[in-house]
Amino acid sequence: MPLSPAAYRKPIWSALSDGPKSSCIKRDRLLQMSAAIDDVRLAVIGKETRFCLDEYRGFGHAVRNVYAFNLRPLRLEELTEGLSPCYQRLRAELDDFISFLLAPDRVETYS
């Protein structure tokens, strides 16, 4: 019987939990993903993607914390228009990172 997605969350989160211990964990994870680690890995996402995702992270915070009555229509329009380019850039960068992970010469380069 295959494991449910929830069964994978805890081990993955545990593996990541040795990072920053701040109240801004999602922002910190974006920072970590946009930084290359010398002799270990490339950056997972670029800085432009990090900034884009951070905009949506901030928006989610506003909606979850009962500030929805303060939402500005123009800001919602900006976020809506930026979503597709942000997603496409994220998808391309994740595909590049997956290719890096699967590259046969990766072991020689980053070991």
Image (cartoon, rainbow, N blue to C red):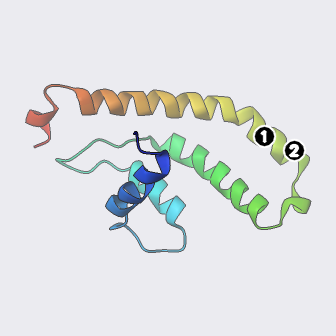
SS at mark 2?
A: helix
Residue position marked by numbered label 1 in the rendering: 78
How many C-alpha atoms fall within 10 Å of the one at disc 1: few (<14), some, or many (≥20)? Answer: few
Q: Residue at x 16, y 32 (%)?
A: 106
Instruction: Give the image location of residue 89, x and y in percent.
Output: 53, 30
Q: With 47 as the anchor, is 82 left or right in this view? A: right
Q: With 54 as the anchor, is 93 left or right in this view? A: left
Q: Point out the image quarter for the C terminus.
A: top left
Contact? badges 1 and 2 (CB < 8 Å): yes
Q: Give the answer, above or below, for where 104 lies relative to 25.
A: above
Instruction: Give the image location of residue 22, x and y in percent.
Output: 48, 74
Q: Amino acid at mark 1?
A: Glu
Q: Tell me how many marks there are.
A: 2
Task: Pick whichever, 1 or 96, lies toward us.
Answer: 1
Q: Amino acid at mark 2?
A: Leu
- The quarter of the displayed image where residue 11 is located: bottom left
How far is the residue under mark 1 from the one under mark 2? 6 Å
Task: Pick whichever, 34 or 19, lies toward us.
Answer: 19
Residue position marked by numbered label 2 in the rendering: 74
Q: With 52 as the anchor, is 16 left or right in this view? A: left
Q: Residue at x 54, y 74 (%)?
A: 23
**Residue sitting at the far bottom:** 22
